[in-house]
Image (tube, coloured by chain):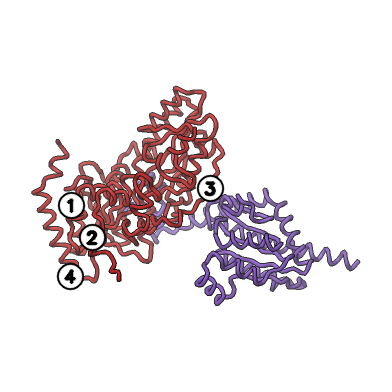
Chain colours: A purple, B red
Amino acid sequence: MNEPDARLGALYPHLKTARATDPEALLDSIRSKAADSCALKQQYFAAHAGDLLAAATAIADVFAGDGRMFSMGNGGSSCDAAHFAVEFTHPVTVGRPSLPTMHLADDTALLTAIGNDVGFGQVYLRRLIALARPGDGVIAFSTSGNSDNLVAALEQAARMDVQTFAVLGGSGGNIRSRQLARHILCVESDSIHRVQEVHVAIYHVLWDLVHTLLADRRGAQAS
Amino acid sequence: MKYVDEFRDPQLARRALDEIVRLADAVRKLRDRPLQIMEVCGGHTHAIFRYGLQDLIPPSMEFVHGPGCPVCVLPMGRVDDCIALAQTPGVILTTFGDAMRVPGSRGSLLQARAEGADVRMVYSPADALDLARRHPDREVVFFALGFETTMPATALTVLQAEREGIHNFSLFCNHITIIATIKAMLDSPDLRLDGFLGPGHVSMVIGTEPYEFIAQHYRKPMVIAGFEPLDILLSLQMLLEQIHSGRCEVQNQYARVVARRGNDPALDAINSVYELREFFEWRGLGSIDASGVRLRSTYARFDAEQKFSVPSVRIPDPKACQCGEVLKGVIKPWECKQFGTACTPEQPLGALMVSSEGACAAYYRFGKRRSLSEEPATI
C-alpha cells in the first residue's frame, strides 16, 4: 500500500496506524494520548482543588464519626469503586490505619439475585438499605452521571441521612443537574478514557488527604 | 432522461438479477447462513426500498442496513445542544429540513421554533451565510451535519465568510466520517458481514483509496455503488463475483462520478477548515474514535461551540427505542416494538424513522409488513 495523501491521512489516521510496519505513527498516538491525559489532570486539579479538599474533609468526618464508606459504579467505574474501597481498607503506606470501606458490587450472588429478581436499577439501592446507617457515606463513580442504579442509590442515601459523594465525567448528567450528591467532583471531558484516568488521580488524592486530615485530628486529640 | 433511463432498463435489470441469483445460490451452498451485504449509505437503503430491490434478491443473501444516515446517528444530546443554541437571544439557527425533525430529549428544532426560537430551514450553508449578511445585528448559526459529502460545502462557506470578514456567522459542527465507523464495525468481534456496497456520494469527495484497508487488512470486498436500480444491481453482481471467486478488492461501479483520488478542491477545503475530534458519539452505536471533525483553532471565531455557551449534554436514547439494535443489524426495523405504532415518520421516536434515508422510515414507507405466516403462533 502506498503512503496515503496527507489530506486523507489527517482525516483517517488509521490509514497510517493500521500498518504494523509504521511504529512512528503508533508512537505518536501514544504520546498524544498521554499528553491529553496529563493536560486534563492539570486542568482539573487547578480548577477544583478546593472541591477535593471539601470532599476529603467530609469523608474524614464520616470515618471520624465511626461511619463507613460505601462505593459503587458500573463497568470500569465499578473497578474504580473497588479500587477506592481497597485503598482505604488496605492502605499501602505503613502507619496509616485501615478505614472501613465496602464496594457495593463485591457480592456477585447478591448482585445477580437483585438484578434478576428486582432489576439492575435496584442493585445498589437494596444493598445500601441493608447495610448503611445514618452517618455513613456513599461515593458513586460514573463517567456519564446518568446510571439509573447510581441515581436510585444516591436518592436513597439522602433519605437515610447518608453522606453522598459523586465522581463524574462529561456534563455530570442527572446526578449533577439534580444535585443528587452533596459533593460532586466532575471531570468535564467527553473522553471516557481520559475521564477515568483523572478519576484514578482524584481518589488517590482523596485517600491521601483523608488520612492526613485524620492524622492531624488524632494528633490534636493526643496533645 | 440521460443518466436515468439507461440505469432503469428492465431487461438489463433482469439479466443482472439472474446473475446475482446464480452467484448467491452458488456461494450459499458452501456455507450455513445467507450472505450478508451491508449497504453503508442511507441513500442506498432508500433506493433499495424505493425500487423494490429488497424483494427481488434471493433468500440466499440479505441486506444489512448500515449507519450511513447522518441525521439518524446524531445523538439526542447534540440535538438538545442545538435547541439551546436556537433559544439563545439574538441567534438565528439554520439547518436542513430533515434535521429540524430529529427528536432530542425535549423535542425537536421544529418544536423549538413553535415555542418562539428563530429556527429557519435553508437549502445550503451558503443560504445561512446570506442570512448573516442580511442580518448583521443577529448571530446566524448553521447546524452543520453530514458525512464527507457535505463537509466541503460547509468548509467553503467558512472560507467565504472569512474572505468577506463576516463575523456573525458560525457552525455548530456535527460532521462525521464514515470510514472510522466502517473500521469500528470491522473491528467488532461479532461481525458477520460478507461485503460492502460502498457509499457513492462520500466517495465522490474522498475517492476509493481510503477503503483499500478494508479489502487488504480485513479481507472484505467492497464495491462503490451508484444510486439507480441498475447501479445497485450491477454493484451487487460485482460483489458476488468477488466473493464467489475468493477475491477481496475495492471496485468502483460508480466510475461516472467517483474518481480514484477523489475531489481535490473539496479535500483541500476540508483539510484547511477541519481537524479530527478524538472521538464522537453516534446514536445507537456509542463513542467511535476519530469519527467526527471540528473547526481548526484558526477558525475558532466561526465555531458555535467556542462562541456560545453550549451545555454539551449527554442523553441516553429512550429505553423503548431500538435504533441501536437496528443500526447494528441485530434486529430488523419491524421487529422493534415501537415500529409503526409509537414511532412513525409523522411522530418519530427514534432517529431511524426521521430521515427518508433511515432504515425504519424506508421500511415503513416501502417495505412489506410481516406476513401472517411470519407471526409467532399463539394458543
Q: Which residue occupies the foreground of this view, A206 or A125?
A: A125
Element assignment for label 1: helix
Residue B302 spot, x, y in % from top left = 49, 34
Q: Name which residue type carries label 3.
A: Val
* Proximity of marks 2 and 3: CB atoms separated by less than 8 Å: no
Which mark is nearer the camera, 2 or 3? Answer: 2
The chain ID associated with circle 1 is B
Which image quarter holds the C terminus of chain B? bottom left
Q: Name which residue type carries label 2.
A: Ser
Displayed quadrant of residue A114: bottom right
* Proximity of marks 3 and 1: CB atoms separated by less than 8 Å: no
Residue B378 visible in the shown view: yes
- Residue designated by label 4: B29
In three-dimensional space, the C-alpha distance between marks 3 and 4, rounded to whole angstroms, equals 50 Å
Return the mark for residue B233. Answer: 1
Q: Residue at x 43, y 33 (%)?
A: B94
In three-dimensional space, the C-alpha distance between marks 2 and 3, rounded to whole angstroms, equals 42 Å
Q: Are marks 3 and 1 on the same chain?
A: yes
Q: Earlier in the sequence, mark 2 or mark 3?
A: 3
- Residue designated by label 2: B371
Q: Which residue occupies the foreground of this view, B130 or A3?
A: B130
Residue B269 spot, x, y in % from top left = 39, 37
In three-dimensional space, the C-alpha distance between marks 4 and 1, rounded to whole angstroms, equals 21 Å
Q: Are marks 4 and 1 on the same chain?
A: yes
Q: Name which residue type carries label 1.
A: Leu
Residue A128 spot, x, y in % from top left = 64, 68
Element assignment for label 2: loop
